[in-house]
Image (cartoon, rainbow, N blue to C red):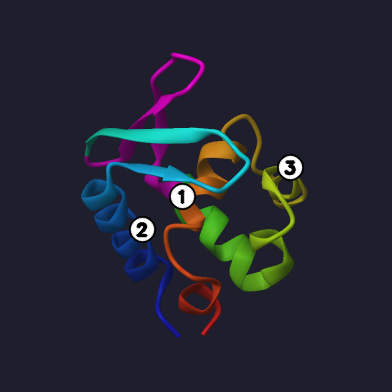
Amino acid sequence: MASSSEILDRILNKFKEQGYSQVPGYYRFGYIRETNSAVIVSRETGQDTPIPKSKIEEAINAVKNDPSVYDSGPSNLRKHGITHINSPLWSLLHLVPLNEITD
């Protein structure tokens, strides 16, 4: 099984390469830039938002512990203590297939 940091690297590489993340039927988030501790995303609502890399790893671990989170919508990250930025986090998770997170 890949470590959370390896999966984070795959997600960020795909995000940079593609330039955006979007789950069909949900908001689109654009790649702006990356810092040592966060990735800055643009939102359709207009506000640029820093997403801490540590929170992305928390979301990865949530899916590792409860794979149903991957398909059940961004609000289900709340039961794993992730709030406010759950939509962009959930979208970023979908840049890699579920089996790359859980296998």
Q: Label 2 belongs to which residue?
A: 11
Residue 66 visible in the current orientation = no
Q: Tell me which segment is drawn in magenta.
A: 36-54
Q: Tell whether 87 sits left or right of 20.
A: right
- Picture coordinates of residue 74, whole percent (x, y): 67, 45
Dot 3 corresponds to which residue?
A: 75
| C-alpha distance separating marks 2 and 3 | 20 Å
Tell me whether circle 2 and circle 3 mark residues in contact (CB < 8 Å). no
* Residue drawn where x is 48% and y is 70% of the image: 97
Most foreground residue, 98 or 82: 98
For marks 2 and 3 on the same chain, the one whose residue lies earlier in the sequence: 2
Image quadrant where one finds the N terminus = bottom left
Image position of 16 (left or right of 80): left
Residue 53: percent from the left, percent from the top? 38, 46
Give the quarter of the image for residue 68: bottom right
Identify the mark nearer the N-term, 2 or 1. 2
- The residues tagged by marks 2 and 1 sit, at their Cα atoms, a distance apart of 7 Å
Quarter of the image where one finds residue 61: bottom right
Q: Are marks 1 and 3 in contact (CB under 8 Å)?
A: no
Q: Secondary structure at mark 3?
A: helix
The residue shown at (29%, 57%) is: 14
Q: Is residue 92 magenta?
A: no
Pointer 1: residues within 10 angstroms few (<14), some, or many (20+)? many
Residue 49 drawn at (x, y percent): 42, 24
Report the Cα–Cα distance between label 1 and label 3: 14 Å
Marks 2 and 1 close (CB-CB < 8 Å):
yes
Amino acid found under the numbered disc labelled 3: Ser
**Residue 36 on image: x %, y %:** 22, 41
Q: Which dot marks residue 92?
A: 1
